[in-house]
Image: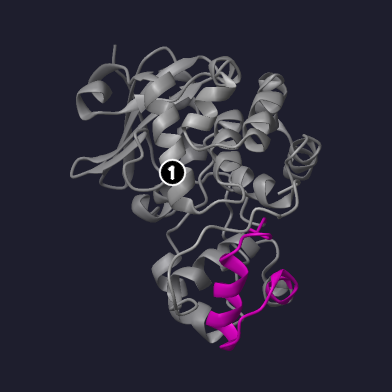
């Protein structure tokens, strides 16, 4: 049965900029951008749902199907950036000042789906995005379920529930290209999936601390989760192979490390992730030279 809801944000929201960060690569079976708006297939704590979001004048209209539909519709304002207060953001670099008008309607979304976001983020540890997205597609299609309502006809697939993720056999993880160290992090974390989803109701610093207490979850993974599930605009992606290089190069013309990026982003607190995204999107990034390669496999385990 279809349920509907509408929300009028207090200021304009660019749906493509805001919701695009929730897509896990090309061919993501849980998301689709179409001419009639955005479609998502997610597994909430109340069950699976298909969610359709579309602009209608100054409002965003939402429709949901499945047992998790009401849970998701209740969080519609947060999904559209209600937790993200852009007031006080001031550009401190010419590049950011030029790009800010284009990004002023971008809001950091909060899905509330902490456990599900953690799975995707762990899959992206220590490998290229292409490798991680391929693994995610294989696992979701193998162990997920067709999205409720019209989602199935669109080819959308709901990811497994937290319990089902934790029950995936070790050989299936390996078949999907996920090594034992990453699958172990997922399985261990999802044994306490309820504690993870409670993070949605905690202050951000407490939520970050709870996530970082998990074995194999460090600053990078925590930031990737809180950026999407909790609307965290102040957790840059420290530890990412590309982000620090691109941010420092776009601002200074030289390639720097996390420490250099931290110094450049410091004036933007509490909007450091917002600044990171604007700088990455507005600049050319480090020129690509030579063949693509996998990331090194000797990186720290608390990623």
Q: Is residue 264 above or below residue 210?
A: below
The image quadrant that residue 162 belongs to is top right
Residue at left offset 48%, top offset 39%: 79
Colouring scheme applied when the structure was drawn: one colour
Comparing 43 with 94, the one in front is 43
Q: Quadrant of the N terminus?
A: top left
**Residue 258 is a magenta residue:** yes
Q: Is residue 48 above or below residue 223?
A: above
Residue 38 location in percent, x, y? 30, 40
Q: In this rendering, would 30 be left or right of 194?
A: left
The segment highlighted magenta reads: 235-262
Q: In this rendering, would 288 be left or right of 270?
A: left
Residue 102 location in percent, x, y? 39, 69
Q: Is residue 128 above or below residue 29?
A: below
Residue 61 location in percent, x, y? 31, 35
Q: Which residue is mark 1?
A: 133
Binning the other alpha carbons within 10 Å of mark 1 as few (below 14), some (14 to 19) or many (20 upward) gives: many
Q: Would residue 222 be visible to someone looking at this image? A: yes
Q: The residue tagged with tag 1: helix, strand or loop? A: helix
Q: Would residue 200 be visible to someone looking at this image? A: no
Q: Is residue 240 above or below residue 73?
A: below
Report the number of numbered marks: 1
**Residue 185 is a magenta residue:** no
Comparing 167 with 80, the one in front is 167
Residue at left offset 46%, top offset 25%: 72
Residue 285 location in percent, x, y? 48, 76
């Amino acid at each position: 049965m279809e349920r509907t809801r509408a929300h009028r944000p207090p200021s304009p929201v660019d749906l493509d900029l805001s919701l695009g960060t929730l897509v896990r690569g090309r061919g993501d079976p849980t998301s689709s951008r179409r001419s009639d708006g955005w479609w998502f297939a997610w597994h909430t704590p109340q069950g699976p749902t298909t969610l359709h979001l579309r602009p209608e004048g100054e409002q965003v209209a939402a429709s949901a199907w499945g047992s998790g539909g009401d849970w998701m519709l209740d969080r519609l304002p947060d999904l559209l950036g209600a937790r993200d207060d852009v007031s006080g953001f001031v550009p401190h670099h010419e590049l950011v000042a030029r790009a800010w008008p284009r990004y002023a309607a971008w809001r950091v979304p909060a899905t509330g789906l902490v456990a599900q976001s953690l799975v995707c983020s762990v899959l992206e540890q220590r490998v290229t995005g292409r490798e991680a997205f391929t693994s995610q597609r294989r696992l979701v299609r193998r162990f997920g379920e067709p999205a409720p309502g019209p989602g199935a006809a669109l080819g959308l697939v709901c990811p497994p529930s937290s319990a089902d993720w934790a029950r995936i056999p070790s050989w299936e993880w390996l078949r999907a290209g996920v090594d034992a160290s990453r699958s172990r992090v997922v399985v261990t974390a999802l044994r306490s999936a309820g504690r993870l989803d409670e993070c949605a109701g905690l202050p951000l610093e407490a939520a970050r601390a709870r996530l970082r207490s998990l074995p194999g979850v460090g600053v990078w993974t925590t930031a990737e989760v809180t950026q999407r599930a909790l609307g965290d605009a102040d957790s840059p992606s420290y530890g990412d192979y590309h982000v620090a290089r691109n941010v420092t190069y776009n601002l200074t013309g030289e390639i720097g490390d996390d420490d250099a990026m931290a110094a450049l982003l410091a004036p933007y607190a509490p909007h450091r992730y917002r600044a990171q995204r604007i700088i990455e999107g507005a600049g050319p990034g480090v020129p690509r030279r030579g063949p693509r390669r996998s990331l090194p496999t000797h990186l720290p385990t608390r990623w």
